[in-house]
Amino acid sequence: MRCFAWALMSNHTHFVVETGPVPLSTVFKRVNTGFAQRFNRRSERRGYLFQNRFGSRPITDDADLMVVIAYVLRNPLDAGLARDLRDLERYPWSSYGAVTGQRDPLPFECVRSTLLAFADEPALARDRLRQWIARAPAPAPSLDDLIRAACRSHGLPERDLRTGRRTQAAARARLEVCRRANAELGLRPSTVARALGVTRAAVCQALQRLEPPQVYKEDRPPAKRRCWCGAWRGRGTRAGGRARGRGRGARRSPGACARRRRRGRSAR
């Protein structure tokens, strides 16, 4: 795993990392657990330190990577932890000082990879990074921003979208929020479901409807294949009706197979 940027704030942290063979959840489980244990020993306290599980979203392209790096490194300045840009370079709980050359990088900081996101030459990359920090690029929209935008575009009050109201306009707005939350923010269906006042299954079904249908061109009818329940299906399978016989090779309709799958029982 490579760390492009990080910043420690008063009650949360920001990281821009590239995942490796170890899952991201495993890495942050170790980081948060170790930090919480050390903090509890130093403060003589017990119990949980972090309120919720960490949140993450994927980086879409190189331009998005530059925006996110600049946003994370500028975060202490926006929060009032640093007075100006010069003070930000001396801020000890951020990788901005290492990227700009004010201090030696820590073992986990990939300064070279961070500079390559802006330019091939280190000096030019540092100048461009300082320009990005100075102009304060806007961060990615939050889930609340997506909900408000969908309500404005569909002419709905925000309460109707957050309470799971069943109207055509609310359904179209929820579908738009699910699509953007998954594509732009990389949020989990459970997180989107809690914000919209619906179940996780409803969000998953909405995302499945957004997937384009797969079209296959076949020059001849498909050969017979064995169904989940053990029956032969294919060109000789009837479109409806009951299964013929009780044997393993008895023909059953697609509807009968689907009903058996739902009931969770295999055919005998």
Image (cartoon, grey):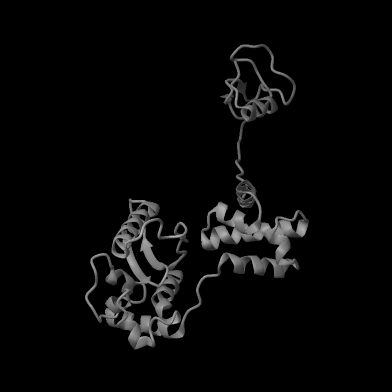
Residue 60 lies, in percent from the top left, at 47, 64
Query: Closer to the camera, 82 or 97?
Result: 82
Quadrant in the rendering for residue 233:
top right
Q: Residue at x 42, y 85 (%)?
A: 134
Query: Closer to the camera, 250 or 175?
Result: 175
Seen in the picture, residue 63 relative to 250 is either above or below; the reply is below
* Quadrant holding the N terminus: bottom left
Seen in the picture, residue 131 relative to 62 is either above or below; the reply is below
Residue 88 lies, in percent from the top left, at 35, 83
Q: Residue at x 41, y 57 (%)?
A: 48
Q: Is residue 159 left or right of residue 261?
A: right
Query: Closer to the camera, 82 or 216?
Result: 82
Residue 146 lies, in percent from the top left, at 61, 66
Q: Is residue 136 left or right of residue 211?
A: left
Q: Residue furthest right?
A: 167
Q: Residue at x 72, y 26 (%)?
A: 239
Q: Is residue 250 left or right of residue 103?
A: right
Quadrant in the rendering for residue 223:
top right
* Quadrant holding the C terminus: top right
Circle count: 0
Quadrant in the rendering for residue 32:
bottom left
Residue 207 lies, in percent from the top left, at 61, 51
